[in-house]
Amino acid sequence: MKIEFWSIGKQHDPSIKEAIEDYTARIRKYTPIKWEIIPVPKHAGMLSENDLKRQEGKMILDWIDKDTVLIALDEYGKEMDSLALADFIVKKGNMGSRKLVFLIGGAFGLDEPVLKRADYKWSLSKLTFPHQLVRLILAEQIYRAYTIIKNEKYHHK
């Protein structure tokens, strides 16, 4: 099963890029993975919040295959601990899912049609994090999930 991380916004911030790349490389030992950084629409600063979300949402929906399992990171989504995340990944693999896409929305979140298309809405925390930090947390947690699945020593129960 392939995993893709999609994030709307700028390229990885240099101050955390190395850590993101490190966890991404670690995940590659278990499964194919790639990052897709989706640029903010042109003239984003001139758009209303709703228009910006709508344009970002249209781009995302145009890119998603019908077979893709879309996990939208959303503040109103369900929280999971690391063991539940590992179980979630195993279950999706056992169901024959070929690709999981973890989607980090733009500055104002995800448009409603994207959230409706999502197969799962996941909240990392009730706290608010900068988008760049969410990328690092996501990569680390997926790596942690795979170490749990493989019964390796990284995760301490």
Image (spheres, rainbow, N blue to C red):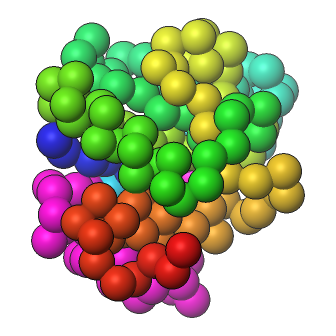
Q: Residue 96 lies in what quarter of the image?
A: top left
Q: Give the vertical position of 58 relative to 124 (above or below).
A: above
The verdict on residue 51 being magenta is: no
Viewport quadrant of the N terminus: top left
Tell me, yes or no, if residue 135 can be seen here: no
In this orientation, which residue lies closer to the viewer: 130 or 157? 157
Q: Is residue 29 left or right of residue 122?
A: left
Which quadrant of the rendered structure holds the C terminus?
Answer: bottom right
Residue drawn where x is 27% and y is 12% of the image: 66
Looking at the image, the residue that sits furthest to the front is: 157
- Relative to 14, is 32 above or below? above
Which sits in the foreground, 93 or 127?
A: 93
Residue 30: x and y in percent read 16, 63
In the rendering, at what x and y percent does residue 26 appear? 26, 77
Residue 114: image quadrant is top right
Q: Residue at x 45, y 85 (%)?
A: 19
Q: In the image, which residues are magenta?
A: 7-34
